[in-house]
Image (spheres, rainbow, N blue to C red):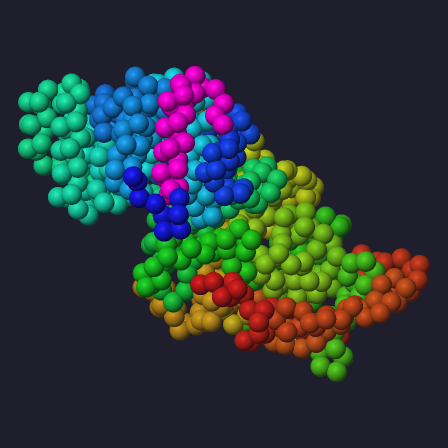
Amino acid sequence: MPKKRSGGGLSPMQQAAKFLGVSVLAGAVMAGIALPAAGALGLAAKGSVQGFDEIPANLKSPQLSQRTTILDDQGKQIATVYSRDRTVVDLKDISPYLQKAIVAIEDSRFYKHGAVDLKGVLRAVNKNAQEGGVAQGASTLTQQLVKNYFIEEAGDDPTKVAEATQQTLGRKIRELKYAIQIEDKLGKKKILENYLNITFFGEQAYGVEAAAQRYFSKHAKDLNVQESALLAGIVQSPSRYDPVNDEAEATKRRNIVLQRMAELGDISQKEADQAKQTPLGLHTSRPKNGCITAVKGAGFFCDYVRQVVLTDPVFGKSKEQRAKLWNRGGLTIRTTLDPQAQQSVQESIKDHVYKSDPVATAATIVEPGTGKILAMGQSRPYGVNVRNDETTINLSVNHDMGGGVGYQPGSTFKPIVAAAAIEGGKPATQEYSSPYEMTYPSPVSACDGKTWRDDPRKPTKLTNENEEEHGPYGMKEATAKSVNTYYVQLISDIGICPVVDMAKKMGVHRADGRQLRQAPSIALGTQEMSPLTMASAYAAFASRGMYCTPVAIESVTRKAGSEQKSLEVPKSTCSRAMSENTADTVSTLLKGVVEDGTGQEAGLGSRASAGKTGTTDERFAAWFVGYTPNMAGAVWVGDPQHKRKMTAITIGGIPHDKVYGGEVPGPIWRDMMSGALDGRPAPDFHLVDIPDGSHEDDDQGKGDRGATDGNNGDTPGQVTGGPTGGPTGGGTADGGTTGTTTGTATGAPRNPFPTPTLSFPEGLFEGQTNGGTGRNGHGGGRH
């Protein structure tokens, strides 16, 4: 008599064996007809087993998770990523030795039985009854395939995996019915092919192709007899027979498989004996997965592509759908990455900033008129080893795409103010007194009929970089020298709202996702932004006023069986941000910056180029953003944690008393753009004639005249009311500033270019307080 459970009755597996045995003897299984409900035999607790007829008839084979390959715009591989390392191959691409070995050791009667091996079931029933437990199984390859389907469908959900592998009569019955269905629809060869592609072979390898690469560094079609026997032997227990960690146990198992193949006539006994004497012959390859494997420093671009797939609704309406698409893999993603530009970016970064430096750099290049991201890199390598100066924070992008909260762009924001003024009718010859020192003009008009006002009790003072810088200046000279007082007078003249509107049209937004604050300090670049945002904005100047949203993906195909299915991808949206004349005028202004102004060290020689330097208050960040007619790029240098001021500092082996935008980011930009553009057309800008101003100052100060903005942001200013003089719109602005805007009289027309006054409020500059929570670069604690 078989042993009984302590509580009385047969064990679940013995019950299953009895149930299947009875069914087999009745001929029901072979006929494929409905089996009696398990409850009729009293074999299961309530609710644990469905009747055979009640199980859905259709089992959909899951889309097998496999590698996703990310390519550059030339079709060359950047990286491979996967949830499960698997490459699906056809049966013809699998060694015949391996096909025979897996059948020999797992289901030797595979080609002779249906979904269930009748003799195997009876043998297992008898053996298990004698042993009083589960000494021998009777699952066919078809049944094992069904089980693997359930496991694959469960993915990485531990609860679903447990349900898919639980040893219950209900699961066995479901497997049985689906196995009958599969045998009828697929046929033996397809079943074997599917089984070899889905099965786990240990060491992160799913399917025979990944296993062949993992253990022998070759394709599955090239496996010899002893290699095939080793892989076939692993399947029963991947951890126990792991050849990497237990060579002796794996060798014993391989030899059992070889002997079984000889007994079945798959190979001769002599071949088996010879193969048994050979060493395992492992030639292992480490699994290479994820953006850390990316070539040419493209790990951060790779991660950006991942973020696009996980966040863009075009890849799925819900977060769960998008994650499933990415994790299942099997995608071939062709990107916009230009290998020449990417290599140039990384080489320039390596030459100018060391990964161990106290500050970092990030650089991005985009294509004007298309929005294509051509290159993206940074000095801190992609990875998780902090001791090796690695990081997974993408310093080039916004927080919601894997970046920090951004960095104050300083004077690189000034061209946006200039564009707003020119678009609104201001001539490029506009002059202002531009003294070395002044208080901020107040009041200044804002959007929605509001007015920004400084605190009259403690007006904020503003200075230029050097005392020699004083006006009057016209726009051309003020831009070349980056004169702070000129641009503050300009925004107070035209108002804040035209600048905010122009910034939005150019895709300029804060890296932390918050709305742009309406304060005159915006003119000096006090609100944190990312290099990708700034490069894309300047690309609008290069394309004569057309702004295109940045894109990283050209096409995506997904492997479905032996076919490739194209998926929809995000498209760049292009819109006119300003007139051609405005863009051409700004290009003329910024061409002067690299020819005669603060950006001379960034010049590209005979190739037409334009750009702007930027250095933030207390030198926590330095920038150069520039462009040619066919490429636009941004370079930021600073401490991602916003703790290290760039004074008395060594960067890339070169000591600096003070870091200027033209001195450190400028040469990085020059070198990366030179390499990226090498051998490519060199078109000219459409320049306009801007007469020189009446004031010429030959005693120029040295270096960048960036936003070294005095006590910006340390004092409260106010923005009050709407058109009817409503309540104060108070609140603390970024970095400790407060803004209050008061409304104009009811029905009074708002002058878009009010006459500036010289009464100026404190705290114009948000995000620049010393030690405040609004400091750029904190990134929510992500380093």
The furthest residue to the front: 1
Give the percent coordinates (x, y) of residue 517.
Answer: 69, 62
Viewer-nearest residue: 384 or 743:
384
Q: Is residue 11 highlighted in magenta? A: yes
Residue 599 position within the rendered picture, expressed as x and y whole percent measured from the top left: 49, 56
Report x, y in % for residue 521.
Answer: 66, 66
- Read off the magenta span: 10-36
Q: Nearer the viewer, residue 22 or 724?
A: 22
**Main SS of residues in magenta:** helix
Question: In which quadrant of the rendered image does the C terminus lie?
Answer: bottom left
Q: Is residue 613 left or right of residue 293?
A: right
Q: Is residue 521 visible?
A: yes
Q: From the viewer's side, name the closer residue of 576 and 253.
A: 253
Is 220 included in the stretch rendered in magenta? no
Q: Is residue 27 above or below residue 678?
A: above
Residue 483 in percent (x, y) is at 60, 64
Task: Name the residue rendered at 56%, 51% in the picture.
Answer: 533
Q: Residue at x 48, y 25 (%)?
A: 35
Residue 596 visible? The answer is no
Q: At 78% from the left edge and 68% from the top edge, which residue is drawn?
A: 729
Image label count: 0
| Left or right: 97 in relation to 548 | left
Q: Quadrant of residue 474?
A: bottom right
Task: Give the residue furthest to the bottom.
Answer: 457
Residue at horizontal 72%, vertical 52%? 501
Above or below 435: residue 754: above
